[in-house]
């Protein structure tokens, strides 16, 4: 399976899990002003919260990814479209680089590590149960 | 289009990054300005999470590189070229590598990736490169193989002929491989 196929399959898997948990899922949602607009893989909208989810297939989470996610979260928090919901960021990848681990803890960004659908599913379900 | 790499500094991350910052001072730019090229919203707190940012390179517009804080074992560098062109990014990273090497800092890069819209771009294989560039078709249709066949028909087999053909084939392979290393396309994998 190519990386882009793996990415798409993981996006589908993750969106199914969130839909089953009662979230409304939007794909490829634009975030940021028009001159610096970027797209996030999934935005899961719950009654009180919104989760921004990025899938990094075939790579480890780096500081850049954590910073990008924090930037998305801060942009989304000020956006009127999310109607004052609590916004959190989730990155799904096959591992985390050391500097990024520190940064994600500091900013409360959830990094789900897993290179198989089973592992990702299990970690996401654990994450949702804790909420 | 982004470039990212994890760097393991053999003589310690902290001292290596400090030396590097001093060495690259002339290229240093405001962290917030640099980060705004990467992310949709950047405030002082986000900017405080990177060590320093530089704009340098050989490309017409020069890339921006961010040096992230490291741990004892490693640090990260991310880069972005304003023209969103992979050639620019490669040239500018080569320029930066030369600057790092001027300091004789021993390092190893791992986890090097080129990313477009959050997806990894990977180099095509050598075989798809030669297919795409039609190098093999060119060889078969215009030079080596027809020449060898006509020579075999005209003068018969000789070791000189065979050696000449194989020398040509090796030269062709080397030149094609150099071309692949230099300009081999990156695609989503």
Image (cartoon, grey):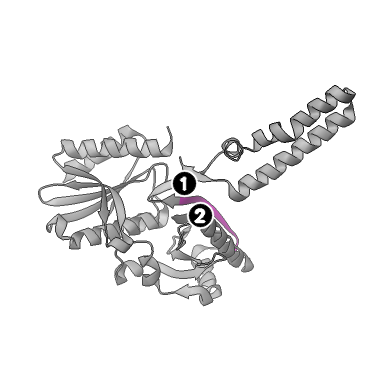
Q: Which residue is mark 1?
A: B121
Q: Which mark is residue B138?
A: none
Instruction: Note whether residue A60 is visible.
Output: no
Which numbered disc, 1 or 2, marks the residue that appears first in the sequence? Answer: 2
Q: Nearer the viewer, residue B23 or B163?
A: B163
The secondary structure making up most of the magenta span is strand
Q: Nearer the viewer, mark 1 or mark 2?
A: 2
Q: Nearer the viewer, residue A59 or B92?
A: B92
Q: On the picture, is B92 further left or further right than A52?
A: right
Residue at image x 56%, y 74%? Answer: B23
Q: On the picture, is B58 further left or further right than A7?
A: right
Q: Classify B22 as above or below A96.
A: below
Assess whether residue A57 is covered by the magenta stretch: no
The quadrant in which residue B68 appears is bottom left
Q: Chain of mark 2?
A: B
Secondary structure category for the residue under label 2: helix
Q: Quadrant of the N terminus of chain B?
A: bottom left
Which portion, as a residue range, is magenta? B105-114
Where's residue A10, x and y in %? Answer: 32, 37
Where's residue A57, x and y in %? Answer: 38, 42
Residue farthest to the left?
A: A47
The quadrant in which residue A113 appears is top left
Disc 1, disc 2: CB below 8 Å? yes
Q: Which residue is mark 2?
A: B86
CA neighbours of label 2 inside 10 A, class few (<14), some (14 to 19), many (20+): many
């Amino acid at each position: 399976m190519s990386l882009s196929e793996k990415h798409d399959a993981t996006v589908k898997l993750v969106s199914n899990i969130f839909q089953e948990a009662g979230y409304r899922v939007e794909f490829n949602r634009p975030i940021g002003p028009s001159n610096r607009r970027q797209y996030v893989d999934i935005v899961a909208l719950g009654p009180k919260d919104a989760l921004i989810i990025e899938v990094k297939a075939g790579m480890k989470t780096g500081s850049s990814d954590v910073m990008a996610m924090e930037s998305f979260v801060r942009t989304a928090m000020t956006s009127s479209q999310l109607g004052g919901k609590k916004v959190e960021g989730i990155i799904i990848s096959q591992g985390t680089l050391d500097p990024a681990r520190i940064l994600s803890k500091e900013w409360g960004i959830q990094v789900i590590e897993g290179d198989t659908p089973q592992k990702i599913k299990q970690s996401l379900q654990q994450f949702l149960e804790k909420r | 289009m982004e470039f990212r790499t994890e760097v393991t500094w053999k003589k310690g991350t902290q001292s290596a990054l400090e030396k590097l910052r001093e060495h690259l001072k002339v290229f240093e730019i405001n962290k917030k300005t640099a980060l705004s090229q990467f992310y949709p919203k950047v405030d002082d707190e986000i900017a405080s999470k990177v060590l320093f940012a530089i704009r340098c390179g050989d490309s017409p517009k020069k890339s921006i590189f961010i040096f992230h804080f490291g741990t004892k074992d490693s640090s990260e560098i991310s880069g972005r070229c304003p023209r969103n062109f992979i050639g620019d990014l490669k040239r500018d990273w080569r320029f930066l590598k030369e600057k790092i090497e001027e300091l004789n800092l021993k390092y190893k890069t791992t986890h090097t990736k080129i990313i477009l819209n959050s997806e990894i771009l990977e180099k095509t294989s050598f075989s798809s490169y030669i297919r795409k560039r039609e190098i093999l078709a060119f060889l078969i249709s215009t030079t080596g193989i027809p020449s060898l066949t006509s020579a075999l028909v005209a003068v018969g087999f000789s070791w000189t002929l065979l050696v000449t053909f194989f020398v040509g084939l090796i030269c062709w392979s080397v030149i094609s491989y150099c071309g692949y290393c230099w300009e081999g396309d990156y695609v989503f994998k």
